[in-house]
Amino acid sequence: MSKPVIGFAGMTHLGLVSAAAAAAKGFSTVAFDSDPARVAALSAGKLHVVEPELDATIAAAGRLRFVDSAAELSGCDLIYVAPDVPTDDQGSSDLSGVEALLDTVRSAARSDAVIVILSQVPPGFTRRRATGDRGLFCQVETLVFGRAVARALKPERIIVGASDPVLDLPAPYAAFLASFACPVLRMRYESAELAKIAINCFLVASVSTTNMLAELCEKIGADWGEIAPALRLDARIGPHAYLAPGLGIAGGNLERDLATIGRLSAAAGTDACVARSWQVNSGRRRDWVLRILHETVLGDRDPLIAVLGLAYKENTHSTKNSPALRLIRQLAPFRLSVFDPVVGSEAVSFHGRTTVASAPLKACHDAQALCIMTPWPAFRQLAPAAIAAAMRGRLVVDPHGLLDNASARASGLDHRVLGRPARG
C-alpha cells in the first residue's frame, strides 16, 4: 500500500512537534488549526513554540502543509487530535478544547479514517467518546519540553489504547507506527490513559526522593553530586534516572497527574497518601531560594535581586508553574532585575519593581544577590569573576549548579547549590 496521509489537529506544542516528526519520517502531513493567523505564521516559518531543532525539522521535512480549514482533513487516512490540554492551579484539566476539536475532526474526516486522541486525557475519556467506534484510538504522548523533537522522532515505545486491544491496528495506523521502529504496546483505553500518569508518578517519585536527600546533604555536610553517580551505576536505578535536585515539580503535567491520582483514588476508595506526600515535598522545595534570601539579604535596606531565567526549564518558552515566577511573586516588595533569553517582559508585568535587562551580566549589575532560576545552557558560560565584578553583593543562589563551584568561591562569591553544604 502507498504511504498513508497523516493529519494533525491543533497546532500548539504537542500537535506542531508531532506533525513535524511525521513529515520528517516522509509522510505527507496536513496540520490543521482553526486560527488563521497562527496558520499563516506557521506557513511563513514563524513558530510560536520554542523547541530545539523544531525550526530545522520543519524546514527540512518538505511534506508538511498548514491549513485553517478542517475540510482539508478529508484527504487524510489517519488523523491525530493533538491540542495541548491546559490545567488550572489545582491541576485540573480543561478538556473542552479536546472535546470540541474531536467533534470537528469527526465531522471532517472520511468514514474510513482512523482517529487518534494524542492529547493527555483522564482514564475513561476515550471510551466515553468512542460510543462503539472501533476507529477511535488514544495514544500516549511522552514528549518532554526542551527535548520534544528528539523524542517525537525516536520514541522508546508507543502506547496505544483501543476498544479491543486484541484486534490488529488498522493498516494506515500500523504503517505509520512501524516507521518509528520501536515497540508498540496495545492495551485497553483506560490502561493507556493511566499509563501516562503511571510514567509521571515514577518520575515524580525519583525527583521527590532526590530532593529529600539533597536537602539532607545541605544540612549534614554531604554532597549530592558525589552520591548521584553511585546510584546511576546501580542496575535497579540506572544511568537515566532523574537524580538532579530541583525546585519542586513544575510545568503543569506532573502536577496534573498527581491531582488526577488524588481524584481517582478518592472516587474509587483507594489510598493516595504517597502522591500527597510528593505534593508536600514539592511545595517545600519550591521555597528553597526564598529561604536563602531571607537568611541573607532580604533584611537589608531595599536590596536589588537579580533573577536569571523565567521559563520553567531550559529550552522552552513555557512558564507554567515556573519556580522563577513564583519567586518573583514572593519578592513583591523588592527591586528586581531579570533576564531570560526567550521569555519576554510580559511574563513579569505583574511585578511593579522589575527591570528587564538585555543581557545576563547587565541583570547582575549592582545586585545584592543573584538567583539563577532556569538552567539555560548559555548561563553555564558566565564567568564567576565577571559576575562578581558586576554585583554589589556576593550571594549567588544557583540551584542547578551551572557555575563552577571552585571558580565561584575563588571569585569571592557565596555560591549556593541544591544538595551541597553552604560552605562545602
Image: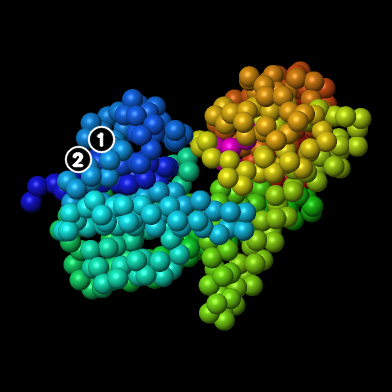
Return the residue at label 2: 28
Which color scheme did the rendering employ for the protein? rainbow
Q: Residue at x 35, y 70 (%)?
A: 127
Are dots 2 and 1 in contact, CB under 8 Å?
Answer: yes
Label 1 Cα crowd, 10 Å radius (few <14 / some 14-19 / many 20+):
some
Q: Is residue 111 left or right of residue 143?
A: left
Magenta extent: 309-314
Residue 90 in picture, x, y percent from top left: 62, 58
Q: Is residue 1 left or right of residue 223?
A: left
Residue 222 in picture, x, y percent from top left: 73, 51
Task: Say which label, 2 or 1, has the lower sequence index.
Answer: 2
Q: Residue at x 34, y 66 (%)?
A: 129
> Where 86 falls versus 146 (above or below)?
below
Label 2 Cα crowd, 10 Å radius (few <14 / some 14-19 / many 20+):
many
Residue 271 in picture, x, y percent from top left: 59, 77
Rendering quarter of residue 314: top right
In the rendered structure, find residue 65 and report the number of the disc placed on it.
1
Rendering quarter of residue 374: top right
Residue 137 in picture, x, y percent from top left: 29, 62
User: Can residue 300 be seen?
Assistant: yes
Q: CA distance from mark 2 to mark 1?
A: 8 Å
Q: Residue at x 91, y 37 (%)?
A: 299
| Helix, strand or loop: magenta stretch | loop
Q: Nearer the viewer, mark 2 or mark 1?
A: 1
